[in-house]
Amino acid sequence: MKSNLTLPVICIQAQTLPEGWEKAVVATWEQGTRVPTQYDKGDDPPSRDVTLVLAVAEPFAEPRIHRALPGGIYDLEVYRQEVIDGIHDEWIAPKEGKWSYTYHERLANYTGLGQQRSIDQLDYIVEALVETPYSRRAQAVLWKPWEDAGTEHPPCLQRIWCRVFDEKLVMSAHIRSNDAYKAAFMNMYAFTELQKVIAERVSERLERGIKVGQYNHIVDSFHIYGSYFEDFQGFLGTLKVRTFEQRTFTTEQIAPLVQEARERIAQSTCQ
């Protein structure tokens, strides 16, 4: 039955991360509504846009990486460390025209309007789950209306929510806007790495194994920009000529590249 929704809602279940991302972008291309964006230039066609609810059952199952990720393995590792370790928190200096936030800073060093002290929201999530693993209150927020409203590049990630089910940590990432083709996979990868860190911290505190469980990627506007259409059609072509194994990497396959990236990052941060 044809839907009369203004903005299609795509619900996808997948076993692995690259499978889920791939299904999500294809569904967006096929079902997305046509709408302009604030970043269009010249004759760019309207973007294709949906609301996405993606559930990945085993985010650390292999294969874990899609070969169509933007950039390369070095960029993926930089972004992972940016979210997990805050390697770019020192770049935050909005008065100097630099970054106004990082996800790590908002999660681990959140400051309120007029507050002198900061809040480590990741600590709060861990404490809440240690006290009551099935709590529905273990969440962290990123939006600051007193800082973000009206800015050119406000945070896309809005909040994360965690809960333990059957000794597995389930995490949902709620996102207002997500570039489906050239950003979403890197987001999913880094956010599941954060999920793993939280699960490990809860395990340590509870003195029992809490594994990484289901990952939910929930997006108000999951979109493919018109300026990417030519590239994206090339991506669609690979789906016809390559097997899923040929379109993905396992963690073991990229291990040497990840190690090389970590060494380069360590050298650059020490300079």
Image (spheres, helix red, strand yellow):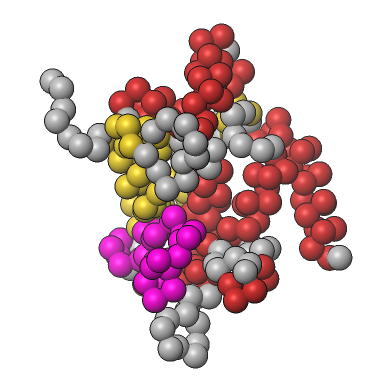
Residue 176: horizontal and vertical position, in percent?
A: 37, 52
Q: Give the magenta-colored segment's residue range.
A: 134-161
Front position in the image: 93 or 41: 41
Pick out the residue farthest to the front.
42
Name the residue located 77 percent from the left edge and 38 percent from the top edge: 257
Residue 78 higher or lower than 56, as above or below: below
Instruction: Answer with left or right where residue 73 lies relative to residue 183.
Output: right
Name the residue located 70 percent from the left edge and 39 percent from the top edge: 73
Residue 152 included in the magenta stretch of the image: yes
Name the residue located 45 percent from the left edge and 88 percent from the top edge: 115
Image quarter of the C terminus: bottom right
Image quarter of the N terminus: top left
Front position in the image: 2 or 162: 2
Residue 151 seen in the figure:
yes
Residue 121 higher or lower than 12, as above or below: below
Query: Quarter-wise, where is residue 14 in the image?
Result: top left
Residue 161: horizontal and vertical position, in percent?
A: 36, 59
Residue 96 higher or lower than 187, as above or below: below
Residue 112: horizontal and vertical position, in percent?
A: 42, 81
Residue 95 included in the magenta stretch of the image: no
